[in-house]
Structures are given as structure tokens and as C-alpha cells.
Image (cartoon, rainbow, N blue to C red):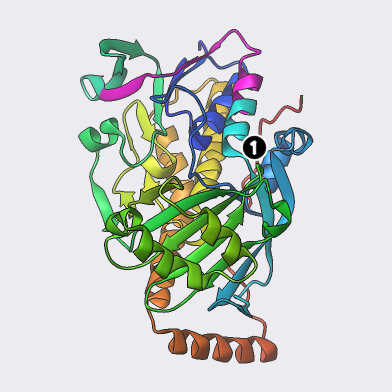
Amino acid sequence: MPTPSIVIAGAGPAGMVLAYQLVERGVPVRVLEQHPDFEREFRGELIGASVLPALEQLDLVAPLVERGLARTDVERRMFVGASRRVTLPGGTERGAVISQPGFLALLHERCSRHPHYRLDFRTTAMRAIREGERVVALETRREGTTDRVTGDLFFVCSGRNSKVRKDLVTLELDEKPDDTLWLRFDLADAPQALPGPVEVHMFGGGVVVVLSATTRSRLQVAYSAPGDLGALRKDLPRLREALLPRIAEPLRALLAAKLDEKTESQVLRVSIDRLARWHVPGLMFLGDAAHTMGPAGAQGLNLAIRDSIVAANHVLDAIAEGRAIDDGVLAAIEAERRPEIEAAQSGQLRAYRMVQKPLVVQHLMFTMLGAVMKVKPIPGVVSAPVQPKHATRT
């Protein structure tokens, strides 16, 4: 049976990690990406312990560290209020902070060594084209021109706003927690002020502030709260009043001097949703396109990469065994991934309900939890191992 050609819509982490695994094993892959490059900001950069070993097996971590595009052994710390550190079941969480643009560029660099790989920037997948029940092509648009991209199998990894997603599938979960305002500050003039860990501060009533240093001497601040954060973003005095008192010194003084009308920011419309079915004949959704995650717990990036590793395992198994990549293969991918996704989304919804409680209640809850864990340790949620079965080290 000839090797199938695969088309991937979306050159984010899910799409590019999938492309890399397939291309390295000789599978023809074409990637479609609507943006002009990888330089997109306000993206997840925390790689957790559930993914880091797999990326190391794929030889993707050490090159990023060598290029100054990743920091390893990064701890994620939880606080009630500005300073009371608390511990969750499972103990210390450690991972790595990566530059997402650098990560995607490395994957593209590796894939580009092979003649059977192609990446089309500025190309948006608009809708799926079917013959009978099976998807046989994607209608695309590039700089106002419509085209048709054919293939044997299609993966949509272009996020929750994918036009293809809206045409083909229905949701079985659709929750809308409070939105998040992301701000980015350049602290190249004060790198000593950048926090080493990722800090999550809960202030009660749904207010959460997350501080995370990037690999480029920048600080990302995520501010989640009830209400219209789009309006807050445009009202500088109110924004300063809402955010700055929740930042500890000496970082507060630095941000007070830098927070102005030119501060880079973006409102993330938070959604936790999940498709009722992740695939149709000839096409499958992965990552946020299949199951949108909120920012709580920094899980979206990690789950998307785990999706891609499992998908590549099943596709490459089928190719190696001379089997057709039919609906049964796609169903097996979904069956392997769905339990973790459902558990993670349930956990996120519980976390959002917990942060809505008053600050005094949060203090009490963590006091009680701490007392219980001193008597009997409570294990955290442990993800099942996901390993690239067909990895080749370069």
C-alpha cells in the first residue's frame, strides 16, 4: 500500500509536532498556516512533566536550551493572596518554559530537511470538501485567492476558531468561565526581577494573577476576573488600580513604571469545550480544535502535544502494518485521548468554581487541605505515559 499524503491545517504545537513525527518517518506532509510566520504572542509556554520526556525523546528540548529558547526545571507555585504559598495534591510541579515561536521554528527547520514536507504560510483552511461521506480536500484561501488542497488524510489543528470545525462537528461541552487579560512587559533592563517559577496567585471572587517569565527577558501577566476585561484593558487608571496592588514589590514598582497605553495586551475569551466526535471519514481534529482548554493549570499546550504523539503513533503503526488509515484508526486515537481530556476539563471546571469563592474561604480550604495532607499524602492526577513509538533521534 502506498504511503498516504497527509495535510495538516494549523502550524501550532499540535500540528507541527505531528508533522515532525510523520515527516521523519518518510510520510509526505503539507501544513497550512493562516499566519505569515511563527511570531505570535500570548501563547502557552509551560511544558509539564507529562510531555517533557516525550519531547526529550524527540530531541527537541536540548536544542532549545542551547539556543537560549528554553528554561528547564521550572516550578509552578500556587499562592492564596500575594504571599501565602499553598500546596496541591501531588506536590511540586516542575517542567520547562519554552519560546513557542522558537519551538515551532525548530520543528519547521527539522521538517524542511525532507523533500516530502511543505509549509504554506498565509493559507487558511476554509471548509472541507467531501466525496460521499469522506473528506478528500480542503478549500483554502491565500491572499484573496481560493484554492483546493487534496490529500489522503487531514488533521485540523488550527484551534477552536477553525472554520472547518464549525462546518463539520457539534459540541458536547461548552462552558465559558471568566476571560483573561494577558499583558507583556519587557524587563530586559531588570532581568533580576523576573520570577524563576511560574506563580499563580488567587485573590478570591474569581480574581487570579499569573506571573511567568519568558525566555526573552519578558514577563507575561495573566489577569483573570469577572466582568468586561475588554473595557478594563482600555481604561488604564482602572487597570492599574485592579492589577498593581496584587503584585508584590519590587516587581510592582517596575510594572507601575511600564504599564501604559503602549503595553502589549490581549483579551483571551476563555472557553472549555469538547467535540461530540473528533473525526469524520478522512479528517480528524486535534488539540484545541477538538477540545478547547482554559488557561487554568497551563494544560492546553501539553494536551495538544500529547494528542499529536498519540495520533502519530496510530498513523505510523497503520502505515508500517500496511493497513488503511480509515475511520477505525481515527476512532482509536480519540478513544485513547478522550479519557484524559474529559478528566482535565472536569478538573479545570472545578478549579474555576474554587477560585470564585471568597478569599477567606480559599484560605480556610487550603488550611484544611494542608492539615489532611500532613496526615495522609494525597496523590495528584497522574497522566498515563505517552511516548512517541517511532521517534528517531537526529
Q: Is residue 5 visible?
A: yes
Label 1: few (<14), some (14–19) or many (≥20) C-alpha neighbours in 10 Å? some
**Where residue 331 sits in the image (x, y, percent)?**
40, 39
- Vertical side of 32 occupied by 180: above or below: below
Write the residue at 41% across / 25% down: 35
Quadrant housing residue 264: top left
**Where residue 33 sits in the image (x, y, percent)?**
42, 24
Q: Residue furthest top?
A: 115
Q: Nearer the viewer, residue 241 or 294?
A: 241
* Numbered circles on residues, count: 1
Q: Is residue 382 visible?
A: no
- Vertical side of 111 occupied by 72: above or below: below
Check disc 1 and report its element: helix, strand or loop. Answer: loop
Left or right: where 377 falls relative to 211 = right
Q: Nearer the viewer, residue 155 or 38?
A: 38
At label 1, which amino acid type do we have? Pro
Q: Disc 1 marks which residue?
A: 388
Left or right: where 288 falls relative to 383 = left
Q: Is residue 161 magenta?
A: no
- Vertical side of 247 occupied by 328: above or below: above
**Where residue 208 sits in the image (x, y, percent)?**
46, 68
Write the residue at 31% across / 28% down: 281
Left or right: where 104 falls relative to 195 = left
Quadrant housing residue 58: top right
Left or right: where 62 falls relative to 90 = right
Write the residue at 61% across / 15% down: 112
Q: Residue furthest front?
A: 257
The C terminus appears in which quarter of the rendering? top right
- The part of the chain drawn in magenta is 107-127
Write the residue at 31% across / 44% down: 277
Q: Nearer the viewer, residue 247 or 367?
A: 247
Q: Is residue 112 magenta?
A: yes
